[in-house]
């Protein structure tokens, strides 16, 4: 049996905290896509840690943490992260497993990412520059190098061949930065990676499922950044939606049970691209400030806006969401009034559907107004104690999306979560 936790917006919905919260109920936590572009924040005994490559179940003893075949892996980031979790007492050598089919991010992938973004000028995607797109391009272009290959004696030849290909691309971009230090670090990190538990991920996970073990699949990014269904081309390069769980771990669709969709009580986006409900005013600034909306991976300020139910309904549909988790509800505590977008007005026509492209049209979000609850909810433990005005806000989400908000997160702490009645 496999349950999924994934983001329904543009990433950073608080997936890391939610995975950490649910991890005790599972035997395996598995990442199925994305790479070090992800930044999943956890508070472990009050100490903050941001995970980029390692699944968010790593702090729970005796849980298996699998980096699946759908992930792109940067050994340098992985090594650094392993050192950080080890310093916090985690014996990752026992609990971390990596699929031999996961593709590697090479230093030249990062360089190409940077060169490509720079060449786009004003049209840049706002990539995290972690080499995600070039690594996935080499995967689908059938040039990539996989984790299993580092155990093979052909590895050096494979590396040199791909390195030469990449150099031609970099020359085309007139990229002249010296990446020799990255490469040195990369080869050091490969030595480290060779010592970890590299497994045949699909057999590994299916055996666990067969034995009755419970698997939690951890999404990275968000549904509106999905390469097929997001705001293309301002997306990431993987399938972030629940379908990605099957291809990213090697499990069959009927094994998936619950799909927990995580949404903030408002919306944020980091990087470029359409964001119909964005607030470029003092309310947006207040949300950014109160919610500490700065990228976990890059430190960039996140763009902030109202919750968008058109996008959320779309995300629930393509993911088959069965339960909703609403995070960062406390960030709205001080607001006088709140708005919820429930339709778009495009060329004078109302719609509740996401257009296939949002760049070349004027989208006017239509809002329903709510009074703010003006109460500090961060210490509240039970649903009954939440302010009535907040309950109406939640109730509107439940009924409009036709899926229940089952969990409400009211602070970054691992214990700050309320189960809805
Ligand atoms: P992820 O990428 O989806 O795991 O999310 P991030 O970790 O990038 O960003 C979420 C941020 O919000 C982190 O700084 C979390 O510590 C914080 N956070 C998570 N849930 C809550 C919440 O309910 N309230 C507040 N105030 N912060 C939260
Ligand atoms: P988590 O897992 C928020 C965004 C980037 C950029 C676009 C493409 O922490 O939610 P990429 O590096 O993939 O080429 O960038 O996607 N992006 C994220 N935004 N959270 C993330 O991950 C993101 N990963 C990528 O800002 O707009
Ligand atoms: Mg994040």
Image: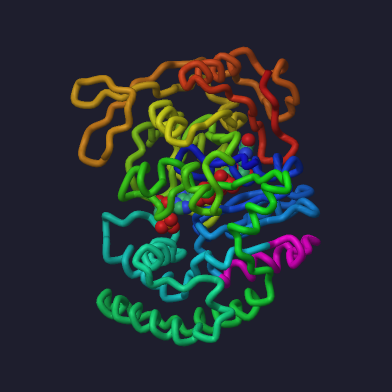
Q: Where does residue 237 sit, x and y in percent of width and height?
A: 40, 55
Magenta segment: 75-96
Quadrant of ligand 1 in image:
top right
Residue 306, can we see it?
no
Q: Position of residue 402 (x, y in %)?
A: 50, 19
The residue lying at 49 percent from left, 32 percent from top is 320
Q: Is residue 106 above or below residue 62?
A: below
Instruction: Give the quarter of the image for residue 367.
Output: top left
Q: Is residue 234 found left or right of 110 in the rendered image? A: left
Which of the 4 quarters of the picture holds residue 390?
A: top right
Asked if residue 38 lies left or right of residue 276, the reply is right
Q: Does the stretch in magenta take in 398?
A: no
Q: Is residue 77 magenta?
A: yes
Disc count in the image? 0
Q: Quadrant of the C terminus?
A: top right
Q: Is residue 269 above or below residue 149?
A: above
Please identify the quadrant where the N terminus is shown.
Answer: top right
On the image, the x and y values in percent for residue 184 come to 54, 84
Residue for point 41% across, 65% down:
139
Image location (x, y in percent) of residue 128: 45, 59
What color scheme is it? rainbow
Going by the image, does 40 lie left or right of 25? left
Residue 231 at least partly seen = yes
Q: Residue at x 71, y 34 (%)?
A: 416
Q: Residue at x 50, y 16 (%)?
A: 399
Work out whether residue 176 or residue 231 is closer to the camera in this orientation and state it: 231
The secondary structure that most of the magenta stretch takes on is helix
């Amino acid at each position: 049996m496999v349950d999924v936790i994934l983001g329904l917006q543009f990433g950073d919905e608080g997936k890391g905290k939610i995975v950490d919260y649910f991890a005790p109920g599972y035997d395996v936590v598995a990442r199925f896509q994305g790479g070090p572009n992800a930044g999943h924040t956890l508070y472990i005994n009050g100490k903050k840690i941001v995970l980029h490559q390692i699944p968010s179940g790593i702090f729970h003893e005796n849980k298996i943490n699998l980096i699946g075949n759908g992930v792109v892996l940067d050994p340098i980031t992985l090594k650094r992260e392993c050192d950080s979790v080890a310093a916090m007492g985690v014996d990752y050598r026992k609990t971390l497993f990596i699929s031999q089919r996961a593709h590697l991010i090479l230093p030249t992938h990062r360089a190409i990412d940077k060169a490509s973004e720079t060449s786009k000028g004003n049209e840049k995607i706002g990539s995290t520059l972690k080499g995600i797109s070039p690594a996935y391009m080499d995967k689908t272009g059938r040039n990539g190098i996989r984790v299993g290959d580092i155990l093979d004696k052909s590895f050096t030849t494979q590396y040199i061949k791909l390195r030469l290909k990449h150099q031609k691309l970099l020359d085309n971009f007139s990229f002249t930065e010296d990446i020799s230090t990255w490469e040195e670090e990369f080869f050091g990190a490969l030595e480290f990676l060779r010592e970890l538990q590299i497994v045949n991920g699909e057999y590994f996970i299916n055996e666990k499922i067969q034995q009755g073990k419970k698997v939690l699949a951890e999404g990275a990014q968000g549904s509106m950044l999905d390469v097929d269904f997001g705001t293309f081309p301002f997306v990431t390069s993987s399938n972030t939606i629940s379908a990605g769980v099957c291809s990213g771990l090697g499990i069959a669709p009927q094994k998936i049970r619950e799909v927990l969709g995580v949404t903030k009580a408002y919306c944020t986006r980091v990087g470029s691209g359409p964001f119909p409900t964005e607030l470029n005013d003092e309310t947006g600034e207040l949300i950014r400030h109160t919610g500490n909306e700065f990228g976990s991976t890059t430190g960039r300020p996140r763009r902030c806006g109202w919750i968008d139910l058109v996008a959320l309904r779309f995300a629930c549909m393509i993911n088959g969401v069965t339960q909703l988790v609403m995070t960062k509800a406390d960030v709205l505590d001080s607001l006088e009034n709140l708005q919820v977008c429930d339709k778009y007005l495009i060329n004078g026509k109302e719609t509740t559907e996401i257009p296939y492209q949002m760049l070349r049209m004027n989208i006017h979000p239509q809002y329903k107004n709510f009074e703010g609850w003006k109460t500090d909810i961060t210490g509240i433990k039970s649903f009954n104690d939440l302010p009535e005005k907040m309950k109406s806000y939640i109730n509107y989400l439940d009924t409009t999306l036709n899926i229940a908000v089952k969990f409400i997160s009211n602070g970054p702490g691992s214990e700050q979560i309320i189960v809805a009645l």
